[in-house]
Amino acid sequence: MKMKTSLVGMALAAGFTLGGAAHATPPTPEMLSLACAGCHGTGGGSAGPTMPSLASHSKASIVDAMKKFKSGERPSTVMGRLAKGYTDADFEAMGAFFSRQKFHPTEQSRFIDRAKAKRGSEIAEQACSRCHLDDGKEGKDDTPVMASQWLPYLKMQAELYDSGVRKMPKEMADRWNKLSKEDREALLHFYASVK
């Protein structure tokens, strides 16, 4: 009887040990991305006009944004609180996951003024194409994808930059600050219209 009890006890101890080890496995990048899907869409393709798509962003742009949210350097309503729950390794995993996702074009013809978008195309070529590559479908280094982001989201970010609440990189600020209000608006319409 004692032998049976000992074997049962050892089996239970082994089960608890293995169960604990299974729970210690870190989440996969795909698992981490599921927490983002509610706002940024499955695979990073946003379906809502105030949320950016994350699909095809560079890993560096995702990591940079998350670190800035976590530190409070980048203003947010929700992201700052959410980012505090993740490690730098989690940010790296998320960035790698979203960088591998296909570019996500949005359908937002209800927002786009075609004449403004046409003018914005010319401005983007002159002022933005060194960092926002391929009409904004690709970003240089830590530059985010601009193409097909929701126009309401782009306008919100532009307001944060213009008010000084969000800091703009110097090279971008030098170019942005030379544009008229109308040209800035046209530029946003262009990036939102890219497919």
Image (spheres, grey):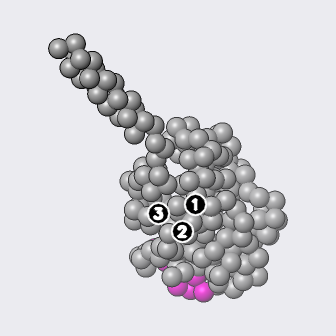
Disc number at residue 44?
Answer: 3
Residue 68 versus residue 146 in the image, above or below: above
Contact (Cβ within 8 Å) of mark 2 with mark 1 = yes
What secondary structure is marked by label 1? helix
Question: Closer to us: mark 3 or mark 2?
Answer: 2
Q: Which one is earlier in the sequence, the residue at label 3 or at label 2?
A: 3
Furthest residue toward left: 1
Q: Residue at x 67, y 70 (%)?
A: 139
Q: Which residue is mark 1?
A: 96
What is the spatial separation of the Cα atoms under label 2 and label 1, in whole angstroms?
7 Å
In this view, the residue in front, 179 or 129, is: 129
Under mark 2, the amino acid is Arg
Q: Of 180 and 75, which appears nearest the observer? A: 75
Mark 2 sits on what residue? 100
On whether residue 115 falls in the magenta region, the answer is yes
For mark 3, give the secondary structure: helix
* Vertical arrangement, residue 142 with respect to residue 125, above or below: above
Magenta highlight on residue 96? no
Mark 3 against mark 1, which lies toward the viewer?
A: 1
Residue interval drawn in magenta: 111-118
Mark 1: few/some/many CA within 10 Å (<14, 14-19, 20+): many
Specify whether residue 187 is in view: no
Q: Residue at x 55, y 41 (%)?
A: 86
Q: Amino acid at mark 3?
A: Gly
> Height in image: 144 above or below 36?
below
What percent of the width, then of the height, locates residue 188?
Answer: 60, 72
In the rendered image of this protein, does residue 4 appear above or below residue 51? Answer: above
The quarter of the image holding the N terminus is: top left
- Give the x, y percent position of residue 143: 69, 65
- In whole angstroms, how far apart are the C-alphas of marks 3 and 1? 12 Å
User: How far is the residue under mark 3 from the one under mark 2?
Assistant: 10 Å
Image quarter for residue 183? bottom right
